[in-house]
C-alpha cells in the first residue's frame, strides 16, 4: 500500500510539472478542457438538442462542451454562414438551429408532381420538394423587412440571370430567379444573420444555397410563400 501511495504521489507531481511546463496530461482537468477546443456557450444544451435532431454525429445533450460537440457546432455554423464558426453556442447559432428544426415541411402543401420551392416566412427558412419529398434544405433565408413584406402566394420562376442589377436599389443580385414582379430568389450581398436587416421583398440566400438553387430550380418551377416574418 505504501508503494502504491508513493507511486500515486510521484504521478501527481509529474502531472503537475508537465502541466506547468505546458504539456497536457491525458485525464487531467487541463487536458479535458483542451479536448473541447472551444468555449461553452450560453445556449450549449439547447444547440446540442437541435443538432441531435438534425442528425449531427457525436453530440451529447448534456450542456457540456466536448471535442465532438465543438466539431459538430463548427460544422453547423460553417454550413449556415454563421460567423465566427468557432464552435461557441451563442444566440445566433441557437436561433438558426431552432428555426431549422421548427420548420414543418408539410406546411408548404407542395404538389407531388412538381418541383416546388417552399419559403417559410415564419421561420425564415427555405427548402425544395419534389415527388412529395424534400430534396434540399431546410436552410436559412432572409425575406422582406417591415414595409416591404414578401407577399405570400403561389408563383412560378420566370426570368433568370447569373447576375442581375437592381436599378432601384443600386445593388447586384447574383443567381437571380424572379418569381413575382420585381421579387426573386438571389444570393445575399450582406451578412444574412443581421436580424435587423431585411430585403425589399426578395428571398435572400447564402452563396452555397443560391448556387444550388440556380443549378436545380428551373424556369416554370413553382414557388410557394407562406407564413409571416416576425416583426413585419
Image (cartoon, grey):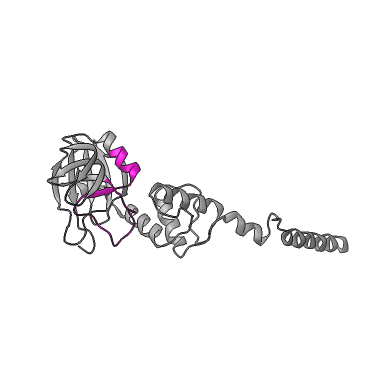
Which quadrant holds the C terminus? bottom left
Residue situated furthest left in the rendering? 181
Measuring from the top left, give residue 50's x and y in whole percent: 40, 55
Which quadrant holds the N terminus? bottom right
With 8 as the anchor, is 169 left or right in this view? left
Say if the magenta span includes residue 210: yes
Measuring from the top left, give residue 213's x and y in whole percent: 28, 39
Viewer-closest of 53 and 141: 141
Viewer-closest of 84 and 64: 84
With 125 as the anchor, is 30 left or right in this view? right
Viewer-closest of 61 and 157: 157
Residue situated furthest right in the rendering? 2
**Magenta span:** 187-213
Measuring from the top left, give residue 85's x and y in whole percent: 46, 53
Query: For residue 137, what is the image quadrant?
Result: top left
Measuring from the top left, give residue 192's x and y in whole percent: 32, 53
Who's the residue at 31% across and 39% down the image?
211
Viewer-closest of 201 and 232: 201
Asked if 203 appears above or below 211 in the picture, the reply is below
With 27 as the anchor, is 125 left or right in this view? left
Who's the residue at 24% across and 62% down the image?
230
Say if the magenta span includes residue 196: yes
Q: How many marks?
A: 0
With 225 as the anchor, is 51 left or right in this view? right
Amino acid at each position: 500500500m505504501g508503494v502504491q501511495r508513493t507511486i500515486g504521489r510521484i504521478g501527481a507531481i509529474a502531472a503537475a510539472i508537465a502541466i506547468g511546463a505546458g504539456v497536457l496530461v491525458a485525464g487531467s482537468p487541463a487536458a479535458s478542457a483542451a479536448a473541447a477546443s472551444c468555449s461553452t456557450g450560453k445556449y450549449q444544451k439547447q444547440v446540442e438538442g437541435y443538432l441531435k435532431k438534425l442528425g449531427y454525429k457525436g453530440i451529447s445533450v448534456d450542456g457540456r462542451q466536448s471535442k465532438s460537440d465543438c466539431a459538430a457546432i463548427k460544422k453547423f455554423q460553417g454550413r449556415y454562414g454563421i460567423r465566427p464558426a468557432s464552435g461557441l453556442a451563442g444566440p445566433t447559432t441557437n436561433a438558426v438551429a431552432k428555426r431549422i428544426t421548427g420548420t414543418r415541411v408539410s406546411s408548404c402543401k407542395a404538389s407531388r408532381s412538381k418541383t416546388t420551392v417552399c419559403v417559410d416566412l415564419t421561420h425564415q427558412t427555405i427548402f425544395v420538394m419534389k415527388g412529395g419529398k424534400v430534396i434540399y434544405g431546410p436552410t436559412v433565408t432572409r425575406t422582406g423587412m417591415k414595409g416591404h413584406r414578401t407577399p405570400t402566394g403561389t408563383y412560378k420562376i420566370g426570368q433568370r440571370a447569373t447576375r442581375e442589377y437592381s436599378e432601384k436599389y443600386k445593388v447586384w443580385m447574383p443567381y437571380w430567379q424572379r418569381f413575382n414582379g420585381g421579387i426573386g430568389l438571389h444570393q445575399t450581398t450582406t451578412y444574412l444573420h443581421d436580424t435587423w436587416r431585411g430585403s425589399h421583398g426578395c428571398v435572400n440566400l447564402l452563396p452555397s444555397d443560391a448556387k444550388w438553387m440556380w443549378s436545380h430550380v428551373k424556369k416554370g418551377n413553382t414557388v410557394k410563400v407562406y407564413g409571416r416574418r416576425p416583426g413585419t
